[in-house]
Amino acid sequence: MDDSQADPEKIREAEEACQSLVPEKPVTPEQHTAAAEFTACMRANGIAEFPDPDPKTARHDYERLGVKGTTQGDAAMKACAGKRG
């Protein structure tokens, strides 16, 4: 099963349960820049509530928005794919 068929709530629960097992890697300035550009792109493509990246990991908590698998969310993700870093 690919992640497009997974229950977003179960994914979030699993990520939270396993978070302590993920080693923290230093995030480069380039990764922070790419994450900020991705955020700006998603917002410019109709996902106004897209979250800022985590300052430590440069990751986005976009699963909670429920935009994945929607027409607007998928279009924004496609438009911004090159900005993910």
Image (tube, helix red, strand yellow):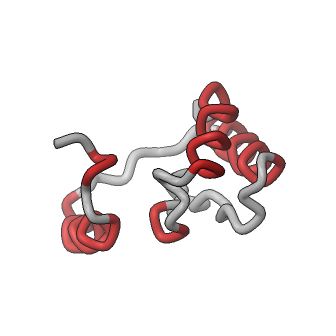
25 relative position to 44: left or right: left
Q: Nearer the viewer, residue 68 or 17?
A: 68
16 relative position to 81: left or right: left
Instruction: Tally the numbered discs.
Output: 0
Of all residues shown, which one is farthest toward the left?
Answer: 1
Query: Looking at the rendering, in which quadrant would you find the N terminus?
Result: top left
> Where residue 75 sits in the image (x, y, percent)?
64, 40
- Residue at image x 56%, y 43%? 74
55 relative position to 69: left or right: right
> Where residue 60 sits in the image (x, y, percent)?
54, 56
> Where residue 15 sits in the image (x, y, percent)?
27, 65
- Residue at image x 21%, y 67%? 14
Q: Nearer the viewer, residue 50 or 59?
A: 50
Of all residues shown, which one is farthest toward the front?
Answer: 71
> Where residue 33 sits in the image (x, y, percent)?
72, 40
49 relative position to 10: left or right: right
48 above or below 37? below
Of all residues shown, which one is farthest toward the right?
Answer: 44
Q: Nearer the viewer, residue 37 or 70?
A: 70
74 above or below 70? above
- Residue at image x 54%, y 68%? 65
